[in-house]
Amino acid sequence: MDAKQLNELADDLFSKKMPLTSLHQEIADNFYPERADFTVKRSLGTDFAAQLMTSYPVRCRRELGNQFSTMLRPTARPWFHTGRRYEKKNSGDTRVYLEWFAETQRRAMYDPHALFTRATKEGDHDFAAFGQNVISIEMNKLGNGLLYRCWHLRDVVWQENEEGKIGFVARKWKPTARTLAKTFPNGVHEKVAKMAEKTPFEEVECIHFVVDADMYDGDAQGRPRYSVWFDTLHQKVMDATPIWGRHYIIPRWQTVSGSQYSYSPATVCALPDARLLQAMTFTLLEAGEKATSPPMIATRNVVKSDMALYAGGVTWIDEDYDERMGEALRPIAQDFRGFSFGVEMNQDTRTMLHSAFFLDALTLPQRAPEMTAYEVGQRVQEYIRNALPIFEPMEMEYNASLCDETFDIMRRHGAFGPENTWPKELQGADISFTFESPLHDAIEQQKGQKFQEAQALIGSAIALDPSTAFIPKTETALRDALLGVGVPATWLNTEAYVTEQKTRQQQATAQQSKLAAIEQASNAAKNIGQSGLVPQQQGAPA
């Protein structure tokens, strides 16, 4: 395909995406009002939540979005570690290099100019509300650092390739003529160059494609993808470059077969409850207003002034009216016995929304003093089952993709030095990432519980058959249990050191046994001599 054909494909995808865009607008209106500009254009100063009766659905989405970064990317501690894929053990030099990789990458990601925190914060809330987000990763314009940006889902479409992976991404972009001429000084259309001089702040419609190399007509030079910048207004290719990376990271939460777009299981469940809650809140507010400021009945031609129902107000009536015929002004009698029932329904709907956003599943179980190790283990198991639907897509689709793309960009730009200076185990190795999270912490903490359970079982077995003491690998089990309960690795001696000390201990024990045997033999000989049982030599006098 050439750029014009890619543009036609993008137009077709944007057209087919319109129903989903409308759904995103509805979701944003209820849960993410500051992002509710999918199908409408808002001016600055618009009251985002003017149409809402209660902020509770918005607060549920906000809390879930904030939990993602708090639990999966805590800035207070390293939340990712590098390693070799499918390899668990590394030598000393390899381990040092891997730790250096992780620390170097973390400094680059959290450089204030990289905007990592801003991009992921925006992406987290898109992920919570819409089940997907779009984050670009690239080098900045000076080439001395990374740059992360989160893009509006309204402006991006994508298509899967034959393997089910995203192979085509198109993003609409409307920069000013000045920005466009500065970004592509030798690639813009001549009309854009003139606009940059005469009307520099006029916007130009453009589109950016990132496609698999076999989709674009050009020499990819062995690289897997093409990056194409296209001026749709003037049908001009401004830049077409083969690239190694993906440029756009698109984490997807819950996918459905037959669609390249995903959904948020939180808002899918919560949307009807949010609509119901808004309607119930409006009804309850109206009922409360009627109870405190009830509608009134006035007698015709008797009330001479407006009804002054405010504090200290005076309402004038005809002085000749006889109130024995009935009050000239009185409130309409109403039945508010159903008000408490409405409040209960409102609270029940809030509970459903809280559950729909997994907020009840994100709290680690508390350990009471009277709870046994088995009870604690069962509660942790329940927490893991409830939390897995949240953490698994976030780690694999989101965090892992961000870290992999970042590492590849930094490696290609020499941030880790020449590969021939790395340990041989790392040269050409597939570097992968592991992550820290409350879920992983809970899984690791189970090792301590399992160790205690195993100790109790083995103790019972040894009482019946002492030979069962040889079954467990005590050293391995204890090391895993200590690391699982959070004991820092720096507190533990290495396996080589432990082996060396065991050898020395065995040698010392053997030496002591040998000395004890010699001493025992010497004492036996001395005792025999003192008892007169030593045989006399031949020729000696009787």
Image: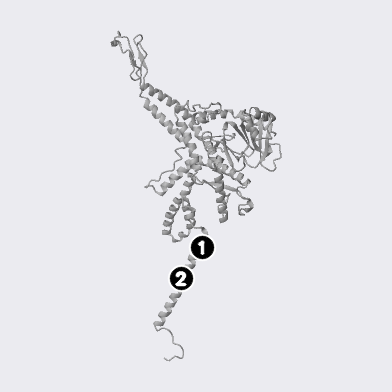
Name above or below for residue 21 compared with residue 301: below
Name above or below for residue 518 compared with residue 70: below
Q: Helix or strand or loop: what does disc 1 sit on?
A: helix
Residue 250 at x, y percent in the picture: 58, 37
Taking depth in this image into account, of 373 and 49 the one nearest to the observer is: 49
Amino acid type at mark 1:
Glu
Residue 404 at x, y percent in the picture: 58, 44
Task: State the image quarter where residue 457 is shown.
Answer: bottom left
Residue 160 at x, y percent in the picture: 62, 36
Residue 386 at x, y percent in the picture: 47, 40
Taking depth in this image into account, of 511 and 293 the one nearest to the observer is: 293
Amino acid type at mark 2:
Ser
Measuring 45% from the left and 37% from the top, which residue is drawn there?
A: 359
Residue located beneath label 1 in the image: 500
How far apart, in angstroms, are the residues tagged by discs 2 and 1?
20 Å
Residue located beneath label 2 in the image: 513
In the displayed structure, does residue 108 sit left or right of residue 231? left
Viewport quadrant of the C terminus: bottom left
The reply to whether residue 91 is in sight is: no
Measuring 44% from the left and 77% from the top, which residue is drawn there?
A: 522
